[in-house]
Image (cartoon, rainbow, N blue to C red):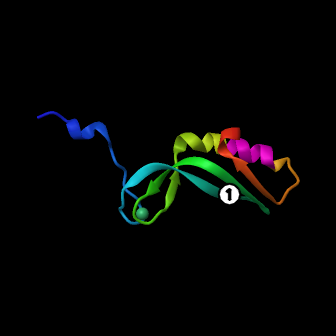
Amino acid sequence: MTGEQEKQKNKKCPLCGGELHDGITNAPFFEGEKIVVIKEVPAEICSECGESYVKSSVVDGIERLLDKIEDIDSEMSVVHYKAA
Ligand SMILES: [Zn+2]
């Protein structure tokens, strides 16, 4: 009677109930009229519908990246998350 199954808690997709697993995604963000695509963002991805959910621990880094990009006069930017 030990809680061995607790070693991996699988979260469920809020959209379809599928299992979420760790992965990497490319996430588009809209900052006013600018489009920023951040590549290679750590995320949890649904194995059923493919929806990706950016981890909360990653959101800070994304906000820092978006702040930097606000200073760049470009309507569309593609950056790597690792640059955060
Ligand atoms: Zn899903």
Q: Could you tell me the amino acid type at mark 1?
A: Phe
Q: Secondary structure at mark 1?
A: strand
Between 18 and 23, the one nearer to me in the picture: 23
Q: Is mark 1 within 8 Å of ligand 1?
A: no
**What residue lies at 74% left-to-right and 54% top-to-bottom?**
78
Which corner quadrant of the figure contains ligand 1? bottom left
Query: Alpha-carbon neighbours of circle 1 within 10 Å: few (<14), some, or many (≥20)?
Result: some
**What residue lies at 19% left-to-right and 36% top-to-bottom?**
3
Q: Residue furthest left?
A: 1
**What residue lies at 40% left-to-right and 64% top-to-bottom?**
48
Would residue 55 be visible to someone looking at this image? Answer: yes
Q: Is residue 22 left or right of residue 65?
A: left
Residue 71, position in %: x, y?
A: 85, 47
Between 32 and 80, the one nearer to me in the picture: 80
Q: Quadrant of residue 5?
A: top left
Q: Which residues are magenta?
A: 63-69
Residue 43, position in %: x, y?
A: 52, 49
Q: Is residue 18 left or right of residue 32?
A: left
Q: Is residue 77 left or right of residue 58?
A: right
- Residue assigned mark 1: 29
Q: Main secondary structure of the magenta part?
A: helix
Please check the rendered image and state whether residue 76 is part of the magenta-colored stretch, yes or no.
no
